[in-house]
Amino acid sequence: MPAPDPALLFLNPPLDSLSTTFAAVALRRGHALKFPREITPFAALLEHTPAALADLHSLLEPSESTFVISFSPLPDPLPAGLTVTGPYSVAQYEFPPDAPLPPLTPNLPIEPLTCAHAPQMVALTDVAFPGFFRSRTCEMGPHFGIRDSACGSENNAGNLVAMSGERMNIRTLTADFREISGVCTHPDYRGRGYAAALLARILHNHRAAGFRSYLHTGADNLTAIGLYQRLGFLSRGQFPLYSIRRA
């Protein structure tokens, strides 16, 4: 198991987020914390022991799965009723606070999304990464979207075809970090620059508010990584992610 990359902004974003910005919604039992199931499927272990995994088991509903970061092998054997898959490599990127902002696309209508649009956001993200966006993920921060009606489409007018927003925001003593997440474009609308336009809008908002922008993606998602790098994001390393499921 590789040692943590010293370039990482956060070694364990779920833990840092649950301990700061989202402490009020954190579910906690002993040495385990997690987000409510309907918000996002992430949790954190305060120590890598069978007891901590047993605590996590007690926080999970039957058949529920969640993701945890661990730079050490998880205890073996696992507590009864838990199964683990992984690790999966996740890449962390930061938009430098002094980097030039990408230009906005003024002729592309981008609208704010609210939790009233949650069913549409869940339906769109389920096309690309099923299960990661939940009915209450919208509560984690502002979200923005593009509809096909705004792009001159005559079919399915008004459908949400691209979106992005915030998720595991983290406050430190020196900065307020906002995680850009939910970057998604329907396959029928890719290649039109929608993701780049949405990312630019959020980056401008973050810079104006004095926030620091960062994000995560699968380390093998070369298409997304290429886009982030073109916009000016810099790699901050990778971490291992495990899926833990209660039977």
Image: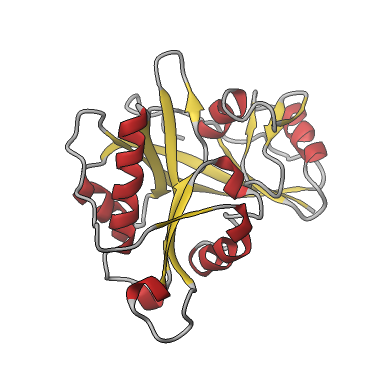
Total numbered circles: 0
- Determine whether, in the image, residue 214 is placed left or right of residue 59: left
Q: Residue 227: where, in percent of width, then height?
A: 26, 55
Position of residue 124 relative to residue 34, above or below, is: below
- Viewer-proximal residue among 25 and 43: 25
**Where residue 61 sits in the image (x, y, percent)?**
81, 48
Image: 4 above or below 91: above
| Quarter occupied by residue 47 | top right
Outermost residue toward the top? 173
| Residue located farthest toward the left when viewing the structure as drawn | 100
| Residue at the spot 32% in from the left edge and 32% down from the top edge | 208
Residue 131 image position (x, y, % from top left): 61, 59
91 in relation to 220, above or below: above
Front residue of 233 and 158? 158
The quarter in which the C terminus is drawn is bottom right
Q: Residue at x 71, y 42 (%)?
A: 36
Residue 35 visible in image? yes
Image quarter for residue 3? top left
Across and down, in percent, residue 202 comes to: 36, 45
Look at 74% across and 36% down and name the residue there. Answer: 56
Which residue appears at 78% of the width and 31% of the height?
A: 55
Relative placement, left or right, of 69 versus 234 is right
Picture quadrant where residue 150 is located: bottom left
